[in-house]
Structure formats: structure tokens, C-alpha cells
Image: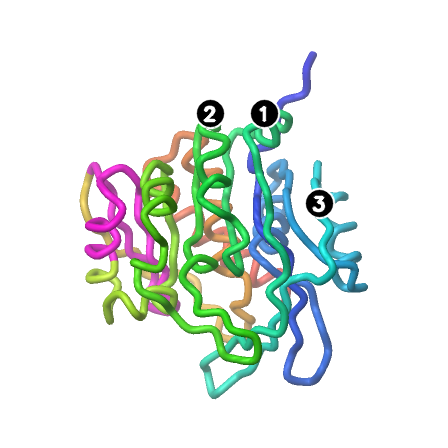
Amino acid sequence: MIPAGPDLLIVGGLTVDRLADGSTVAGGSVLHAARAVAAAGRRVATITVAGAEPQARSALAELAALGPSRVTAVPSSIRFAIRHEGRDRRLVLEARGGNLPVTDGDFSALDPRSTLLGPVAGELAAGAVQAGADVPVRVATLQGWLRHLVAGEAAGPLALAALGADLSAALGELDALVASDEDLAAVAPRPRGQLEALRAHLGRRPLLVVTAGADGVWLDDPATGIHHLRVTQALDEASTIGAGDAFAGLLAVGLRNGLTALEATAAGMDGAAAYLASRR
């Protein structure tokens, strides 16, 4: 019997993040989503780009232990300094890393049931989004394409026009798109307005989801309209780093398993909360 493909293939760059105390840790959507989905008992595969830093090598070994993993090697991983100002978290770019080329062959070789495109610093071009069109469920997080990224400066949100025509068209063909209200701060001040702007820009096909921290999750389902799901599990003492990535990965798996948009969103919220709680 031919083994079934992974439940989720995650594509995006690995990061090496410098914390306020000077220590460094690996991060990025590819790592957080893989950990959360694997912890939920699902099979994962990853495609990433990374440098040779000790933290990156350790994270790559972890990804390889979780499932099939393809790595594009570059001189430096994407690197951020993470700074906290009260409850706000700021990312200061230290190194841009490299681009992550992805082709139809990469997807067909792994035969995933769903995929999550999770760029961190624009490392995925429109061609990477167009690849893998035969995957049953395709989801992307928008943050890595909507960040102002200049070395030595804090990352900030960009307007939707920054996506460009080719990337916007490719994203509009996916099944679901996820962003935080902070990612979309340059688009509109509140989640409902952000959803409306996303819909106008990206067309009628994708499920659109905006995460809003303690305010829960807002979604625009093409079939049933706009909904607001409130947080049911408060995790005041847990770090929220990686929460959005965990949520997006679990959302993709839920949609592939036949859940409705509302059911998959709720399951993703619960799963992300469980992932954060496990790191306490």
C-alpha cells in the first residue's frame, strides 16, 4: 500500500529571533504550524529556507523528525530582534534571508491533503502561490507579504496595493486567507472593515479570516457572510508567539477534513489555545 501524503504541507521561511535578553530562538510560521499540527496528531511536511545558525540547524532537525522536509540553504536565515513595548511586540529586521522557490513538482512529490503558505519576509513569490493547484485545500497567511521590511527598522503594516497584481490574483484563487488585525492596520482600523477591504481586493472565492487577539476571530465566509467568534479559552500567562501560525495550520486541516468554515475556525482557535498552553 502506498503511504498517504501528509495532512498538511507548510511552506515558508525559518527565522532566528533575538529576544530582549539577548538569547536567540528559532521561529517562523513553518515551525509553529508544524509543531501545533503534529501535536494534534496530524502528519506534517515542510518546505523551508534557512541559514546555518545553530538555532536554525536545531529547528531543521526538529522539522525533519516531524515529517518529510525540504530545505533551501542560504547564507543567513531571516532574522528579527523582538522588542516589547508594554503589551505590544515589535519586530526589527536584522537580515532578510533568501527567497524560497517552490514548484508544482515539490507539491506532487509530497502529495499533501492541504497546504499552508506562511511567508515571513516576502520569501514566496506569486509563482510559489500558483504552484500546487491540485492540492485539495490551500491556505495562506498574509503577514509575510504585508510587512514593511528594511534592515534595522521595525516591521510595519503595508496597504493591500503592496501585494501587486500577480500575487493578488494568485491569492484570490486559494481556499482561505488568514491575517491578524495588526497585519491589516494600514487597511482599516477594525476587523470588519479589514474583511470588507480584503474581499474587495481579492475577490469572492477565498474564506477570509482576521484574528484579533482577545477579541477573537472574524471571518467572511463566501457562503454565509461575516461572523465573529469570541475567545473561549483565556491564556493570559502564555506567550502568544506562533498563535496565528498554529491557528492557520489547524484551520487548513479542518477544512480538508470536511468541517464548515465556522467549525474549522472554532477548531483552529481551540487547537491554537492548546498549543500555547502546552508551552507554559
Query: Callout 3, which amino acid?
Result: Val
Q: Position of residue 280 (x, y in %)?
A: 63, 68
| Residue position for label 2 | 134
- The number of discs equals 3
**Residue at (53%, 75%) from the top-left corner?**
91
Nearer to us in this view, 90 or 241:
90
Crowdedness near tag 1: few (<14), some (14–19) or many (≥20) residues, C-alpha within 10 Å:
some
Q: Is residue 206 magenta?
A: yes
Q: Which secondary structure, mark 1?
A: helix
Q: Furthest residue to the bottom?
A: 86
| Residue position for label 3 | 71
| Residue position for label 1 | 108
Q: Is residue 156 magenta?
A: no
**Residue at (42%, 73%) from the top-left corner?**
156
Per the rendered image, the range of residues in magenta is 195-223
Q: Furthest residue to the front?
A: 165
Query: Callout 2, which amino acid?
Result: Asp
